Image (spheres, rainbow, N blue to C red):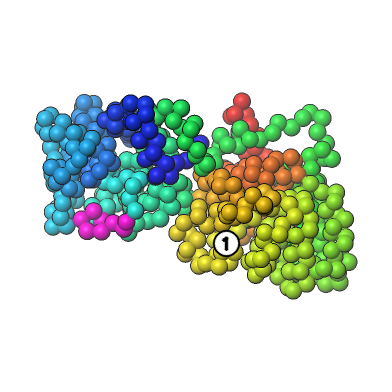
Amino acid sequence: MQLASAAQMRELDRRTIEEIGIPGMVLMENAGRGTVDWMERSFGPLTGKTVCIFAGPGNNGGDGLVIARTVHARGAYPFVFFLVDPEHLQGDAAHNSSILKQIRLPFQILDTSEKMLSLIDTVLTLNRMHPIHSLVDAIFGIGLERNISGHFLDVINCINVLRERHKIPVVSVDIPTGLHSDTGALLGGAVHADLTVTYGLPKPGHYHHGGATVGQLELVDIGIPSKILLNAGLKGMALDKSTVGHTLHRRLATAHKGSTGHLLILAGSEGKTGAALLCGRGALHSGAGLVTFAVPRELNPIFETVLPEAMSVALPTAGTYLSMEDCNQITALADEKQALVLGPGMGTADKTAELILHIYTTISAPLVMDADALTVLAAHPEVIPQTAGPRIFTPHPGEMARLLGESISTVQEDRLKSAQWLCSSEKEERPHMITVLKGAGTVVADAEGTWAINSTGNPGMATGGMGDVLTGIIGGLLVQGYSPWDAACLGVCLHGLAADCIARSRPCGYTASEVAQILPRVMRTCTLQSQ
């Protein structure tokens, strides 16, 4: 599913109004009515119940006023709380305010903090008269850029109290107030919604950081013509189950291990063999035909016994880490493989770092770069443009911060911008390079400006080894013939779906190995659902 930034969405609205001739009032009417449809689907019939609408100063507030009229027509009792004097509203929002007055719907103006003191009591009084169906957050929409303060923040806090303490469902119009539409950052405070109904296209902020304040996300078609969408040049997308169904290849009946790819994994050192082994499990369970570990000689017995489905090659170096002495044999091994994984648990000793940089700059096969390989690259940023072939970087926020020379908080404040670090005026001279910035709402971005945000996964994944499995999955997909972009997006989405499948019965406490093991079942389910 395509995503649109706030600026792109405003442009889509403008072109629909000015070029196609659909009035803004029609778009607003479609948005409000579509929201009410989802309110009833999610929280039951409206008849005989109260709906409290909190209307802000712009078009988001105008959407809220359409919702007030619509629920009234469906037998509910709307009560509008204006957060600005309705006489100050403009455009379509002002027009809807005048309609509301004509049909004499009840309202109250809350334009100062002093007027907020009795808000919770007022809502609870309304609840005693007619049970409250839901609270509608129509305060600020996707255009919000500044931190919220004053009585607007007071209203947000009251809405959250009514939701948490009194279990009243909250519906956010387009995006929860206080959530930055493009970055997902909290702007001083945010409404915690149970349902968010967005318009036209979802926004990046719905998915960044896992969309923690969004709740159930639903989409309403407000009437933007497909002609406008197709010509908008949108480069962002959301990764979900449909992504998997449309991207997964159907395996031929004549497939054999030699035709389904061979992955070489350069990973592991003393005390960190688990990272390499988990990577191998991810690759095998994603469908790779063959997996070979190239490992320090003294550690080879571990690899030969723990993961019998994989092969291992004991490299010449005497010790428990890889070094340049292993370079010739690694190069020979790489010639026979469709892709390599480099870095998990590998260590950053000088001789190992020298080997990592050499492989990065000389081997033309696709490389999935993770963990210690990224730390080495961060220490040698001048080497990054010197890649010999396609590269997929899989940093967590700390590794991304090292690559950028920034703080982790800076990375997290704008995850999409951070993931797009490879975009530059010199990108035409680079082979295909992709970043997978891990975390809640993993971001995938390439040097061409294309990007995606993952919608799968859950907090139970916050345990050791998950990233190693993801790296293996991406490597396993590469050797099966997926493009670097498809391998990265598909790997991220499948990884999260597998964890979501486990989390239905165990919200936390499951392991990375279990996520790898359930991958084939998830892939099968997605394939069947896409048929």
**304 vs 53, nearest the viewer:** 53
User: In percent of the image, x 84 and y 40: which residue is there?
Assistant: 258
The reply to whether the magenta stretch includes residue 435 is no
| Residue 249 picture location, percent across and down | 69, 33
| Residue under numbered circle 1 | 400
In the rendered structure, the answer to whether residue 451 lies left or right of residue 96 reads right
**Dot 1 alpha-carbon crowd within 10 angstroms: few under 14, some 14 to 19, many 20 or more:** many
Q: Is residue 407 visible?
A: yes
Question: Residue placed at 61% from the left, 33% from the top?
Answer: 245
Q: Is residue 267 above or below residue 213?
A: below
Residue 67 lies, in percent from the top left, at 25, 34
What kind of residue is marked 1? Answer: Met
The vertical placement of 395 against 167, above or below, is below
**Helix, strand or loop under label 1:** helix
What stretch of residues is rendered in magenta?
A: 146-153
Q: Is residue 427 above or below residue 530?
A: below
What is the number of callouts on the image?
1
Q: Is residue 195 left or right of residue 303?
A: left
- The C terminus sits in image quarter: top right
Residue 148 belongs to magenta span: yes
Residue 509: x and y, percent? 56, 55
**Quadrant of residue 324 in the image?**
bottom right
Q: Position of residue 238 (x, y in %)?
A: 51, 41
Q: Nearer the viewer, residue 81 or 48?
A: 81
Q: Examine the image and state in which quarter residue 129 appears.
A: top left
Question: Is residue 498 something one can see in this rendering?
Answer: no
